[in-house]
Image: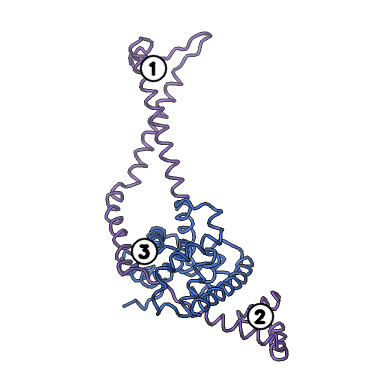
Amino acid sequence: MNNIEETLWNYIDGNCTADEQKTISNLIAQDEAYRLRYQELLNLNKEFAAMETDEPSMAFTYNVMEVIRAENAQVPLKAAINKRIILGIAIFFAITLLAMLVVVLASVKWTGQSVHVNLPVNIKLPDINGSKAKTIVESFVFFDVILALYLFDAYLRKKNMAKQV
Amino acid sequence: MQSKLSDIELIEQTLAGSQAAYADLIKRHQRFVFTLAMRFVKVREDAEEVAQDCFIKAYRSLGSFQGQSKFSTWLYSIVYTTAMTFLRKKRVDTDSIDDEDTFIQVEERSSAYDVNDAENKSRSYYLNQAIGQLLPDDAAIITLFYKGEQSLEEIAQALGMEANTVKVKLFRARQRLKEKLEKNLKHEAKELI
C-alpha cells in the first residue's frame, strides 16, 4: 500500500521520469484502486497547499527595526577606532621590543657559571633580589596571569557565542 | 504597501545603508518566518521571539549572503537553527523534542481555548491542528514544501539534510498528517453526534 502511495505522491509532485509518468497514468486510467487512491491523494495535496500561514503581531516589523536601529546607533563608536592605527601601534611596539631583545641578547656574555649583561649605555638595572622588589615583581606576574586567564576566558565565551549564533 | 523590488535588490539597498529596504524585506517574509517558527516552538509568543531573532541575525550577517541560493532558503536555515537553539535553551531535551505525544498534549491543551469559535471549526482549522500535532521537523518540511515555495533540494539546504532524507520525511509527514487529520475529524464527528 505504501508503495502505491509513494509512487502516486512522486507522480503528483512531478518527481517521476517520463516513462514512469506514462506507466502511472495508464495505471490510474485502468486500475480502479489506483484511480481512487490517486483522487484521494490529489484532494489531500490541494488541501495541504491551501493551508493558511500565521500572522505575527502588528508591531513585528517595528520591533525588529527598533533593535536594528539601536544596534546601528552603537556602531559609530566602534567604527571610530581605526583598526589600521591599532595595527600600526602594535607593529611599532613589537619592533621596539624585538630590537631591545636583540640588543640585550647581543650584550650578554655567557661564562661558565654566571651571565653578565653589558648594556651599550650606562643603565642601572633595578635590584630584583631585594625582598620588597621581589614581592612587587611576584604581585605583578600574578596580576598578569589572572588578567591573561580572564581575557582568554572572555575570548572563549565570545567564540562559543558566535558558534551558537 | 510592499516593495516591488526583488529580494536581491532589497538586500543590495540594505547593504548600502537603507533600513527601509530591510523593513520591506521583513514585511515580505515575516508571515512565513513566523509560521515556520510556530511549527517548531508551538507557542505564539515564543514563535514571535524566534522570528524576530531570525530577522536580526539575518540583518547582521546579510553581508555574508552569497546569493547562490534564494534569500528565503537562507532565511529559513536561520529559522531552523534559531528555533533549535531556542528549544535547547528552554531546556526541552532531545527526547521530548522527538516525542510526538508531547505535541499532541500541547495541541490538545491549547486547542481547548480556541475550540469554541465556530468559525475555526473549518477544514483548515483541523489541518492546522493536525500540523501542530506533528513533530517539528515534519511540520516544518510540510510547511516549507507547500507554503514556502521550496524544492526538496532547497528544503534540504535549509534544514541541513540530504535531499533524499527530505523526500522520505515529506512522504512520512504527509502520511502522519493524513492520519491525524482523519483522527481529528472523526473525533469531532463523534462529539457532534
Identify the image quadrant of the N terminus of chain A: bottom right
Q: Where's residue A65, x and y in %?
A: 31, 63
Q: Where's residue B190, x and y in %?
A: 53, 77
Q: Nearer the viewer, mark 1 or mark 3?
A: 3
Element under label 2? helix
Find disc 2 in the rendering and name its residue.
A8
Residue, x 37% and y 42% (percent of image)?
A: A87
| Tint of chain B | blue
Q: Look at label 1 and name its amino acid.
A: Leu
Cα distance between the residues tagged 1 and 2: 90 Å
Q: Where's residue A56, x and y in %?
A: 36, 69
Cα distance between the residues tagged 1 and 3: 57 Å
Element under label 3? helix
What subunit carries mark 1? A
Cα distance between the residues tagged 3 and 2: 45 Å
Labels 1 & 2 near each other (Cβ < 8 A): no
| A77 displayed left or right of B57 | left
Find disc 3 in the rendering and name its residue.
B15
| A18 displayed left or right of B28 | right
What subunit carries mark 2? A
Residue, x 69% and y 91% (percent of image)?
A: A29
Q: Among the chains, which one is purple? A: A
Residue, x 68% and y 80% (percent of image)?
A: A17
Find disc 1 in the rendering and name its residue.
A119
Q: Look at label 3 and name its amino acid.
A: Leu
Q: Nearer the viewer, mark 1 or mark 2?
A: 2
Check chain identity for marks 1 and 3: say if they share one: no
| B182 displayed left or right of A57 | right
Tell me which numbered mark, 1 or 2, is placed earlier along the sequence.
2
Q: Nearer the viewer, residue B77 or B36?
A: B36
